[in-house]
Image (cartoon, rainbow, N blue to C red):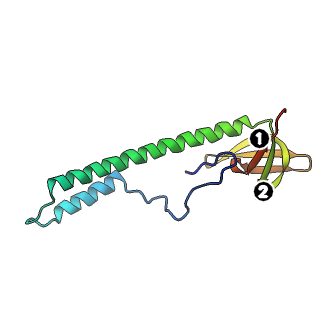
Amino acid sequence: MAIDAIGLAGNADPTIPKNAAVSQEAFLKILLTQLRFQDPLKPVDNQQFLAQLAQFSAIEINRQQSEKIDTLLQMNSTGQAMNLLGQEVEVQGASGAGVGEVTAVSFRTGEPLLTVKTAATTIIDVRLRDVRLIQEGN
């Protein structure tokens, strides 16, 4: 999941499918199929076999770290959003633009969305990346 920090554009690549990763179970099926259909006169070298297992272990560790980082980013963006409650901010986004006070924080699919009350209107569903300036001295 891609989480936006204040003032940063999202970096999620929409061209990569969410199910692009190979699960441990799928890897084991591939490995067993490889072993089942290997040439008996030219079996897989032990070093090559161990290298494949080590590569898969490294990939699994990387996937777990990525999930933990995603969780930390989500917690960070939630903290940022909560700290903006009652603050005067300048926003520029698809849902509107203006300067106003953050009056509420809501969540949609884990992403915090702000409600900003300006002098003229209320702008809802403002993403953190749409906050351009936090006013001092409020």
Name the one closer to the observer, 101 or 33: 101
Place of residue 107 in the rendered image (x, y in percent of width and height, measured from the top left): 67, 45
Residue drawn at 92 percent across, 50 percent down? 120
Residue drawn at 37 percent across, 56 percent down? 22
Q: Which residue matches tag 1? A: 104
Residue at far right of view: 120
Q: Which residue matches tag 2? A: 95
Q: Secondary structure at mark 1?
A: strand
**Which circle marks residue 33 in the picture?**
none
Task: Answer with mark 1 or mark 2, whichever residue precedes in sequence.
Answer: 2
Residue drawn at 76 percent across, 48 percent down? 132
Place of residue 77 in the rendered image (x, y in percent of width and height, measured from the top left): 64, 41
Residue 74 placement, left or right of 20: right
Residue 23 placement, left or right of 30: right
Amino acid bearing label 1: Ala
Residue 135 placement, left or right of 32: right
Quadrant in the rendering for residue 13: bottom right
Q: Secondary structure at mark 2?
A: loop
